[in-house]
Amino acid sequence: MTLLVEKQKHLMRLRIVLLTVCVAFLVLGPATANAAPQSVTDVLKLKPKWEKMVGLKFLVEGRFGGSTSEYLSLLKLPLAFRSDTEIPLRYEAGDVLQVLGELQRDSNGQLYFKLLDHRKGPSDMERLQSQIVDLPLKEYAPIYELADWALSRGEFYNDEKLKAEATKLYDRGLRREQAMLKTRDYRTFRELAIKAERYGLGEERKYELLYEGQYWQWQLERQQDNAQQLAGLATAVEAELPGAAVPVPVVDQEFRDQWKAEPLRVYEKSSFGRDQMHRFLYQEIMLDSIQKEARSDGRNGKAIARRLHDELPEFSALADKFVVKELDWQMGNVTKLTIEQMLALREDLLKANDAERADRVLRDWFNDRELRLRNEGIDGLIELASLYEQLFPDGAHNAVKTLLEAERRKPGSTIVRQRLESHGYQLIDGNWKSSEEVRDFENSPINRAMREGRVVPGMTQEQVRRALGEPTSVSRLLTAKQVIEYWVYGDASRSSRLTIRLSRPSQRNSAIVVDSREVKR
């Protein structure tokens, strides 16, 4: 019993809900004939509940589907309206009707509408145009709502004209929303571009919105003075807008100047050349990014030029100007450059056929280095010698002079000795001699005599010892100005003896051979 009561209560609640849902559409009698009609689409949505709605009256609005003397139908509505009296055939295809009927079930159990009344209403296009006139001037949501109705209706009846009007309304609503934007940046315009795509407004309209969004974002970013953010924005433009990634080697300069003066107006007015305008926008944003990293004194001009060549090959002339700016800066600061930077600068000037400035760069840089290195002691002189060797084709001579100067300042340096020996110098009798001097020294009469074991005038006592060894006896004769020494080689047992006379001035420590004679027994 309890279950039966609950079931009855449930059915009552369901009936109340159904009545509530349909209250705006259901017609309960002649007194409600002016109630808002229910579209065929709305009636079809109630199809699962039709069985429970027998006996209810409907005012249905839809397009005329056909009629006989007893039947009247609406397009796409599977339930016909049956009449007890003859139906006059006064409607044509495409007419919009409002038909009052009561949902019934025939003897076969089939559902139908009992025709109570019918009349012709405004066409869909007439209804649309009247609602367009009433649209508010400062809102865009009602425009979208009306477009939704027109599109839904057009798709339901496969009405291309109505769908075309819906597209126009979507575009109108989008333009109204665009005009009312409080924030103009990439995000807000991208949202509009997504709507344009969803509403089927075409690629051109979508790109218009993306282009304007990127433009406004550029205006915001350039105020932040952030080169990296601008480069990121340029990359987004390149990826998103057709043609932005394609260099334009030959440009109508008048067209570009017009665009640059009014980027939005020129784009809006002409659909011709939009791919080029996408490239122009990319160029300006990337150029902003690159130039923000350029030093005002020009010292990083080559790096800027490389970026221009990589990102904006159309701007090769501007890239060359940045190279010149760095060359000028380097010329003015040549003494601050490393040797690698100085040589690179010199090479650039030679490539530019500017030999005069190339020579001046080397001279100014080296003179400054020489002055500083000479004040740094032996280590500075060693480095200076290396610079002579590295920078000048005939620098070996000055390198040796510098190394000899280092040797005089600090005798016995291993590094200096190794470097001098690498130039062919030898230390002989406490003096460094070149390879030529060594050859001349070795071929002198005294050195030949020493090698042959002979004695000749002019030899020192040390050279005599190297040639003949220690004398057998030595005697001396002292005078007022000099000391005369007699060196004898050979004893009484030999058939001959060699006597050498050496003279040593009183103020000197070493004696010199004056003459020699061999005495035979």
Image (spheres, grey):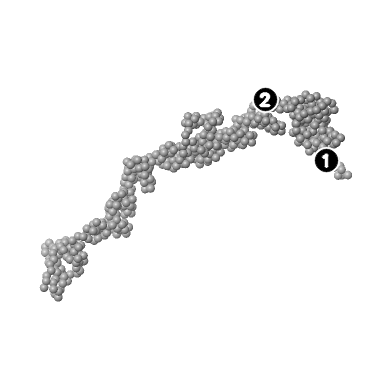
The correct choice, above or below, for 390 with respect to 459 in the image is above
User: Which residue is drawn at the image coordinates 71% and 32% (left, top)?
Assistant: 157
Sequence order check: which comes first, mark 2 or mark 1? Answer: 1
Q: Nearer the viewer, residue 99 or 517?
A: 99
Q: How many marks?
A: 2
User: Which labelled disc corresponds to residue 10?
Assistant: 1
Q: Amino acid at mark 2?
A: Val
- Residue 14 is situated, as x and y percent measured from the top left of the image, at 81, 38
Picture quadrant where residue 129 is located: top right
User: Which residue is drawn at the image coordinates 84% and 42% (left, top)?
Assistant: 7
Element type where label 2 sits in the image: helix
Question: In the figure, is residue 167 to the left or right of 315?
Answer: right
What residue is pinned by disc 2? 133
Element type where label 1 sits in the image: helix
Q: Nearer the viewer, residue 478 or 264?
A: 264
Q: Amino acid at mark 1?
A: His
The correct choice, above or below, for 516 with respect to 338 in the image is below
Q: Is residue 506 visible?
A: no
Picture quadrant where residue 9 is located: top right
- Residue 362 is situated, as x and y percent measured from the top left of the image, at 33, 45
User: Which residue is drawn at the image coordinates 56% and 33% (left, top)?
Assistant: 212
